Image (spheres, rainbow, N blue to C red):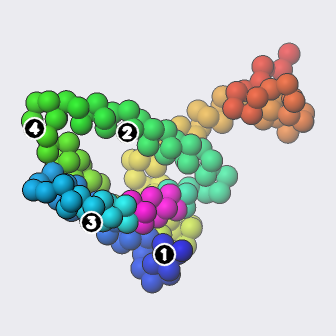
Amino acid sequence: MIVRKLVKKFLDRSIAVAGLMMQTASYLMTAFVPRAWMLYPVSAITSFGVGITTPTLTGIVSRAVPETEQGVMMGTAQSVVALTRIVGPLWAGFSFDWLGPGAPYWSGAIMIAIAAVLISSSTAHSRTSSSHLQRSTANSSAASLWNARIRVYRLARKNTRWASRDHPPDPSCWSMYPCPLET
């Protein structure tokens, strides 16, 4: 509800950057708090920052491609998020052991600040028309990579029974796995 009201007043990109900067500040505060009770208000700042950033970034990602490719884009984005949930704790453990107890937080703050800078310096605006957004993202190298991934995805689906327009989906196939090629 809060994000919906914010999106009506501000650009999605501005909201995402503000949320990321809140997370950056709260991670830095977490790294250097002198008393344990101070973690409560800092955690509230972190939660609010994550709460406004996550749905806003999801919206930005979903509008970065045409409707027909949104599933591929969202699946890939969620895969990247899952990868960060694997690599992040590994980095946190390493930095805690080698750099000190506050290192996972200040190093995380640096990474989040870099993400905020990258988002704020991007040229795509979420309130522009979808055709303009598609043109602006088509010129970027990231869009080229996404387009290549989508072409590979379409090629892999081309001759499968569940992707064919001539045949209905095979009920014996799981939706997450392609069915055997037609014989």
Where residue 93 appears, x then y in whole percent? 23, 32
CB-based contact (under 8 Å), mark 2 and mark 4: no
Crowding at dot 2, Cα within 10 Å, few <14 / some 14-19 / many 20+, comes out as few
Q: Which mark is residue 100?
A: 4
State the separation of the CA atoms marked 3 and 1. Answer: 19 Å
State the separation of the CA atoms marked 4 and 3. Answer: 23 Å
Quarter of image, res 99: top left
Q: Nearer the viewer, residue 61 or 69?
A: 61
Q: For the residues carrying marks 2 and 1, which lies nearer the camera in this image? A: 1
106 relative to 95, above or below: below
Q: For residue 151: magenta? A: no
Q: For the residues carrying marks 3 and 1, which lies nearer the camera in this image? A: 3
Crowding at dot 1, Cα within 10 Å, few <14 / some 14-19 / many 20+, comes out as few
Where residue 71 appears, x then y in whole percent? 63, 47
CB-based contact (under 8 Å), mark 1 and mark 4: no
Q: For the residues carrying marks 2 and 4, which lies nearer the camera in this image? A: 4
Mark 3 lies on residue: 41
